[in-house]
Amino acid sequence: MKCSGKEVAALCSHTISAEFTVVDVDCAIAVQSTELRSNRGMPMADSVMAATAQIHGCTLISDDAHFEGIPNLKTKWYN
């Protein structure tokens, strides 16, 4: 059976809310994100993820080179 886009989105949404804590982007994350974008030339989505991980002390899991060498950012690399 092939799943539709709507079914896949519902499954992903359920998995995210069951397995992760979702946090709002607040002023501190927005400011940190802006600094990362300005200093490192990162895309906005990447800078928001990095800033969120830094502020909340989370490990960011990625294979994206944009996250390499960012101070105070714990990363776990996958390939």
Image (spheres, rainbow, N blue to C red):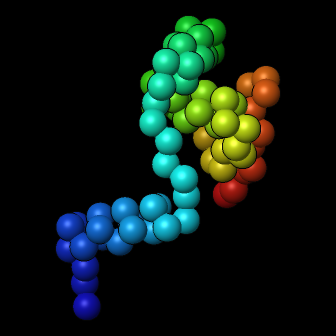
- Left/right of residue 32 with respect to residue 4 in the rendered view: right
Quadrant containing the C terminus in the rendered view: bottom right
**Image vertical order of residue 36 relative to residue 38, above or below:** below
**Image vertical order of residue 73 relative to residue 39, above or below:** below
**Image vertical order of residue 51 relative to residue 9, above or below:** above
Quadrant of residue 57 within the rendered picture: top right
Quadrant of residue 8 within the rendered picture: bottom left
Could you say where residue 15 lies in the image, as x and y percent from the top left? 45, 68
Could you say where residue 66 lies in the image, as x and y percent from the top left? 62, 30
Identify the residue at image location x=75%, y=49%: 76
Quadrant of residue 6 within the rendered picture: bottom left
- Left/right of residue 20 with respect to residue 59 in the rendered view: left
Q: Nearer the viewer, residue 77 or 18?
A: 18
Q: Nearer the viewer, residue 32 or 23?
A: 23
Tally the numbered discs: 0
Identify the residue at image location x=79%, y=27%: 72
Query: Which residue sits furthest bottom?
Result: 1
- Left/right of residue 39 with respect to residue 44 in the rendered view: right
Tell me if residue 78 can be seen: yes
Identify the residue at image location x=70%, y=43%: 58
Could you say where residue 59 lies in the image, as x and y percent from the top left? 72, 45
Identify the residue at image location x=48%, y=25%: 26
Could you say where residue 63 lies in the image, as x and y percent from the top left? 64, 47
**Image vertical order of residue 61 relative to residue 70, above or below:** below
Tell me if residue 43 can be seen: no
Quadrant containing the N terminus in the rendered view: bottom left
